[in-house]
Amino acid sequence: MAKVIALYKQPQDKEKFDEHYFKVHAPLTEKIPGLREMNVTKIVGSPMGKSEFYLLCEMVYDDMDALQTAMRTDEGKASGKDVMQFAGDLVTLMIGEEVDG
């Protein structure tokens, strides 16, 4: 499995962020061909107390080829453009592969 991981810092206006994320961005992202699952986690803290992070999203694909193909689709490009427009200053994007123990 291959993943795109999006980690968002705390937004100034959480209500505005949530409105866009859950009503616009997530539905755009869910349309990406080849996306197997999309898991969104709200960060509620850390072992040290507060966290600088607000939200984490894992987008899972069968393998790295499927992920790369998905990112080149119109839907993949639309999702990428949207995230940069509404949260470009908040998001860190990573690509990873699951490791068998």
Image (tube, grey):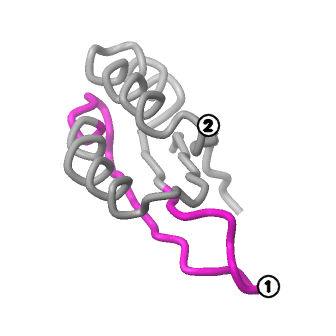
Q: In the rendered structure, which segment of residues is drawn in magenta?
A: 29-56
The crowding category of the residue bearing disc 2, from other C-alpha atoms within 10 Å (few below 14, some 14 to 19, many at least 20), is few
Residue in view at x 33 percent, y 55 percent: 16
| Camera-side mark, 2 or 1 | 1
Residue in view at x 51 percent, y 44 percent: 1
Which numbered disc flags the more N-terminal residue, 2 or 1? Answer: 1
Residue in view at x 27 percent, y 31 percent: 32
Q: In this view, does 78 lie above or below 87?
A: above
Image coordinates for residue 13, horizontal then vertical, percent: 44, 59
Image coordinates for residue 90, horizontal then vertical, percent: 58, 45
On residue 86, the disc is none
Image coordinates for residue 92, horizontal then vertical, percent: 63, 42
Residue farthest along the front direction in this orientation: 12
Alpha carbon separation for disc pair 2 and 1:
26 Å
Quarter of the C terminus within the rendering: bottom right
Q: Is residue 78 above or below residue 41?
A: above
Residue in view at x 53 percent, y 29 percent: 64
Secondary structure at numbered mark 2 = strand
On residue 48, the disc is 1
**Circle 2: residue type:** Ile
Q: In this view, does 41 lie above or below 59?
A: below
Image coordinates for residue 21, horizontal then vertical, percent: 32, 50
Q: In terms of depth relative to the viewer, which is nearer, 90 or 63?
A: 90
Q: In terms of depth relative to the viewer, which is nearer, 99 or 84?
A: 84
Q: In terms of depth relative to the viewer, which is nearer, 101 or 28?
A: 28
**Circle 1: residue type:** Met
User: Does the magenta run of residues contain 44?
Assistant: yes
Q: In terms of depth relative to the viewer, which is nearer, 10 or 30?
A: 10
The residue tagged 2 is 95
Secondary structure at numbered mark 1 = loop
User: Does the magenta run of residues contain 47?
Assistant: yes
The crowding category of the residue bearing disc 1, from other C-alpha atoms within 10 Å (few below 14, some 14 to 19, many at least 20), is few
